Image (tube, rainbow, N blue to C red):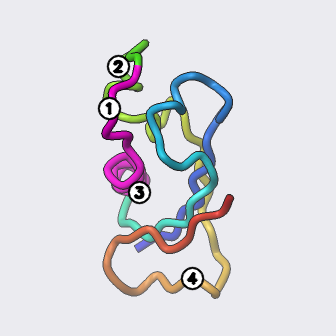
Amino acid sequence: MNIYKLKPRNPGSDVWDGSNFKGSLIVRAKESDNALRMARLKYKRTQMHKIESQETAYGPWTGANTDFEYVTDSKYSIDGDEEILEEIS
């Protein structure tokens, strides 16, 4: 497993209205796409909002709207299931 830090790119953009959380995330996942999918599923808005693009329709946690970096801090174990480990506001 890898540890990723996901960071919204331009969190003030309207596309981020589709997420309940706009901070950074620390995620343990096999691949970055899995980390993004977990974020989309957990933080998608369930209420109606204006859809301006396909990314908004599926949630803003996509490669087009999110930067990520590998985390090597021993605070986070690479052992275990895929999961969101920490929210950073």
Q: Residues within 10 Å of mark 3 (few under 14, many from 20)?
A: many
Residue 74 in percent (x, y) is at 64, 87
In the rendered structure, are the residues bearing label 2 and label 1 in contact, judged by CB atoms less than 8 Å apart? yes
Left of 56 or right of it: where is 5?
right
Give SS at disc 1. Answer: loop
Kindly identify the residue that appears in the image at 37 percent across and 46 percent down.
40
Q: Nearer the viewer, residue 81 or 48?
A: 48
Task: Tell whether position 34 is magenta.
Answer: yes
Give the answer, above or below, for where 50 lies relative to 69.
above
Looking at the rendered structure, which numbered label has been put on residue 58?
1
Question: Sequence-wise, which precedes: disc 1 or disc 4?
Answer: 1
Residue 44 in percent (x, y) is at 37, 43
In the rendered structure, are the residues bearing label 1 and label 4 in contact, judged by CB atoms less than 8 Å apart? no
Looking at the rendered structure, which numbered label has been put on residue 18?
none
Q: Which residue is mark 3?
A: 35
Q: Which residue is mark 4?
A: 76
Give SS at disc 4. Answer: loop
Question: Sequence-wise, which precedes: disc 3 or disc 1?
Answer: 3
Task: Tell whether position 73 is magenta.
Answer: no
Work out which residue is located at the far top of the displayed protein and give it: 52
